[in-house]
């Protein structure tokens, strides 16, 4: 109810309190009172990928960056961990771990873009109409 910026900040605060990660939120370009149709999808992505960073990345830092312009809502999630080998995403899906694939499918279905890169570290970039 407080909006995506407040929700991501709360998520980051919770992660920092329950883990050894230094968690940062950059959301200066996201007005406090803005609500978009992409809020739920972006929050779900932030939650999913931060869980993966906690469990698998061996990272020290995690950063969420929110951005918005007249047409797009953007979320960038970056950690400084071990990274994701390209074949790991396909293997995770074969093993029944559908988090990445599910978020990716939802982003693409919403007319957005979804990119994962990095090694070392991982960067997830999502842009959706909003």
Image (spheres, rainbow, N blue to C red):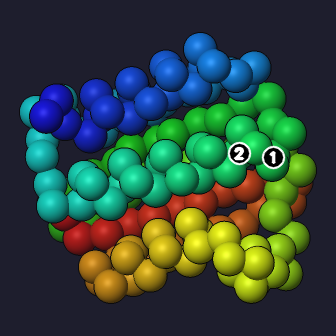
Look at the picture and state if 27 lies above or below 105.
above
The quadrant holding residue 41 is bottom left
Which residue is found at the position 58% from the left and 26% from the top? 15
The answer, for residue 80, to whether it is visible in the render is no
Check residue 53 in the rendering and tell me which mark sits there, or answer none.
2
Q: In which quarter of the image is the C terminus?
A: bottom left
Is residue 15 at all visible to an observer of this figure?
yes
Q: How far apart are marks 1 and 2 (CA)?
A: 5 Å
Q: Total of numbered circles in the picture?
A: 2
Q: Quadrant of residue 123?
A: bottom right
What residue is rendered at 23% in x and 70% in y? 129
Q: What element carries label 1?
A: helix
User: If the image is split into quadrants, where does the N terminus sit?
Assistant: top left
> Image height check: is 13 above or below 28?
above
Residue farthest to the top, as pictured: 17
Q: Which of 77 and 1 is in front in this view?
A: 1
Is 70 placed left or right of 13 in the picture?
left
How would you rate the neighbour count of disc 2 (Cα within 10 Å): few for under 14, some for 14-19, many for 20 or more?
many
Label 1–label 2 contact, CB within 8 A: yes
Examine the rendered structure and indicate whether residue 65 appears above or below residue 71: above
**Is 90 above or below relative to 58?**
below
Identify which residue, 67 or 62, lies in the foreground: 62
Residue at (39% x, 35% y) in the render? 8
Query: Which percent across, then down, holds residue 121?
Result: 80, 51
Q: Quadrant of residue 116?
A: bottom right
Mark 1 packing: few (<14 Cα in 10 Å), some, or many (20+)? many
Q: Residue 110 carries which label?
A: none
Mark identifier at residue 57: 1
- Which residue is painted at 44% across and 81% down in the image? 105
Left or right: 59 in relation to 72: right
Q: Is mark 2 on a helix, strand or loop?
A: helix
């Amino acid at each position: 109810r407080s909006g995506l910026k407040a929700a991501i900040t709360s998520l980051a605060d919770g992660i920092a309190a329950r883990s050894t990660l230094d968690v940062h939120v950059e959301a200066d370009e996201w007005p406090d009172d803005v609500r978009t149709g992409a809020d739920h999808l972006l929050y779900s992505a932030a939650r999913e990928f931060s869980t993966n960073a906690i469990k698998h990345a061996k990272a020290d830092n995690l950063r969420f960056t929110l951005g918005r312009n007249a047409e797009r809502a953007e979320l960038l999630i970056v950690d400084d961990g071990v990274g994701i080998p390209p074949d790991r995403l396909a293997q995770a899906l074969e093993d029944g771990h559908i988090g990445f694939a599910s978020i990716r499918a939802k982003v693409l279905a919403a007319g957005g873009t979804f990119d994962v890169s990095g090694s070392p570290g991982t960067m997830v970039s999502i842009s959706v109409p909003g």
